[in-house]
Amino acid sequence: MELIQQLVNGLSLGSIYALIALGYTMVYGIVKLINFAHGDVFMVGAFVGFYSITILELPFLPALLISMIVCAIFGVLIERIAYKPLRNATRIAALITAIGVSLLIEYGMIYIRGAQPEAYPNDVMPTSKIDILGVSISSQSLLIFFVAIVLMIILQFVVHKTKIGKAMRAVSFDADAARLMGINVNNTISATFAIGSALAGAAGVIFGIYYIKIEPLMGIIPGLKAFVAAVLGGIGIIPGAMVGGLLLGVIEALVSAAGFSLWRDGVAFVVLILILIFRPQGLFGKNKREKV
Amino acid sequence: MKKKKLAGIFMSLSLAAGVLAGCSGSDEKASNSSTGKEETIKVGANLELSGGVASYGQSILEGLELALEEINKEGIDGKKIELTTVDNKSEAAESTSAALKLTSQDKVAVIIGAATSGNTIAQVQIAQDSQTPVISPSGTSPDITFKDGKLNDFIFRTSFIDPFQGTVAANFATKEVKAKNAAVYIDSASDYSKGLAKAFIEQFKANGGKIVAEEAYVAKDTDFRATLTRIKSAKPDFVFLPGYYEEAGLIVKQAREAGLDVPFMGGDGWDSPKLVEIAGADALNNTFITNHYSSGDPDEKIQNFVKSFKAKYKDKSPDAFNALGYDTGYFLADAIKRAGSADSVKIKEALEATKDLELVSGTFTLDDKHNPIKSASILEFVNGKQQFKTKIDPE
């Protein structure tokens, strides 16, 4: 029974990782950039959600939507201001810029509102407990899982069935060829940032409701874990990010369940090292040969 | 050219002479004040007025200012206490330089502060070297006054120490809650948390109880569900959670969601309004804390303090740090009175001899490690409000 309870704990945590990991993986897939500011977009999403709920007094769904929209715009702004001028620069230059943007957002937030934590109100969502065979599941974890799955299905639909999704896949496959076919590469890249950031914003609101406490540096660790999740699934591959996120959540829950809770963060990064040594292309990745 | 050079040398010489003259002047003044012939006694406050734990320092200063206002109405043998305040920005390095400024520039007789153990330890060396007594209102770590078998003889405190809170909590668990199987969940990055937990475990075992689970987290964690599920499966009837309010709030909330409905207990680290915001009033029912004092205690001395505090600070209800700041003022005034002088060494000797001093946070006598022996209050959270439960005296 305890094992099932731990699996439930792991899946709720994992669905938050998965939502953030999707943004990492989509951006990497299209511009080959690890966007380290992504965890901070997640933080901004949590705060936008918080202020929508407390100041504008909105219920959960509108707050979630506002947060997703604000984050989408914020993501596009970051891309246009910080990354676009470096599109043809070396990859290390873009990577360093990403770290700089991340620090700017974190400490900009502290400058604006201070470093003190904020607590999400407790009554955003009903908190009933469901007891099945000695396993108690809170309605919140179910809802989180449900919202995450719905968002992922919508994403799959956008990527595979819409025009912009087709453009995204084309640009990620070969940007130059896509441009020759008349695809507006810049807009497609912006759209990718918008979708990825919106998902991070949603993850931020969900995180706030589930874990209550939010603060300006909250994005760092979930951001890094989501990066591990993206690499675990195979960076650039969308289903890989989902599975990687859920898997990482479950691994962490099981590590704590075995009594090594202090090792939990360490284990996540050991997973990263192992995957980089033994299967650098990730669980879902195909081994690509360099064309000669 | 040559003339200009000469003029330059002359000017700089005269400037240097002026500086030296200034120095000797201030030296004379200082030696005057330390002989105690002046009408005021200089006291420095080195407190956390900004930064991470600013609320602790600000609360202490409010209490201290109220106490000094009352004391200065009559004065101590006609002398008044003059307070010089320095902000240490909640940082150890700043605390050291604040102590240096207070001892060498302001020539204070006594330093009050800092609020946290770490920032107090940062000024120990300077206090010992300059023979200036330091009184920490709320530093609860035993290491402040006594470390590695050596007493820091110029360092004092107004609060009780960490192990005492753990012992009181264990006795409460056995006698009042009738707990037999306790779980302990500590913050592995905090000496405060470890100190309380160690004392709790020793006393609880001595009372015939069993520790069924010992788990740890790291400050800033947000997900405790996996570990709480593990604790739940060990079936404890009491959980001791000595941590700070940010994590304690999250843990209590997540524990209640996981169906762990047994009593939880913590120390003075839980004492913040944020705790109720984070955990929610419902989840906090059936939880207890040990604290220095409670504004709900019916004791007359406490109610008088609450009344005069509310009169001065716009109806604000005094918290434990306000009370400790207030008590520190009286602890010092009592010693100065008995010393009969503003001399630092005489004040230190008088502080050491403090006995049966009645203060808001309990009647206390100083032991040979400079730790007050005094009572602790136990408070219960009822619908998000702290309620006075009982007061436990040291044995």
Image (cartoon, coloured by chain):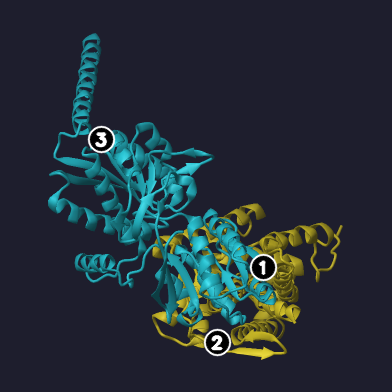
Chain colours: A yellow, B cyan
| Quarter of the image where the N terminus of chain B is located | top left
In the displayed structure, A178 sits above or below B96; it is below
What amino acid is found at the position of numbered circle 2 in the picture?
Answer: Thr
Out of A221 and B56, give the one closest to the viewer. Answer: B56
> Reading the chain from its start, which is encountered first: label 3 or label 1?
1
In the displayed structure, B331 sits above or below A236; it is above
Q: Are marks 3 and 2 on the same chain?
A: no
What amino acid is found at the position of numbered circle 1 in the picture?
Answer: Ala
Distance from the alpha carbon under mark 3 to that under mark 1: 52 Å
| Residue name at image x 41 percent, y 71 percent | B390
For mark 2, what is the residue?
A127
Residue A178 in percent (x, y) is at 71, 72
Q: Could one spot residue A51 in this view of the protein?
A: no
| Residue name at image x 58 percent, y 76 percent | B254
Number of numbered discs on residues: 3
Specify whether B205 is left or right of B317.
Answer: right
Residue B28 figure quarter: top left
Chain at tag 1: B
Q: Secondary structure at mark 2?
A: loop
Residue A179 in percent (x, y) is at 68, 70
Residue A137 figure quarter: bottom right
C-beta proximity under 8 Å, tags 3 and 2: no
For mark 1, what is the residue?
B213
Chain at tag 3: B
Specify whether B27 is left or right of A240.
Answer: left
Residue A121 in percent (x, y) is at 46, 80
What amino acid is found at the position of numbered circle 3 in the picture?
Answer: Asp
Out of B166 and A196, give the one closest to the viewer. Answer: B166
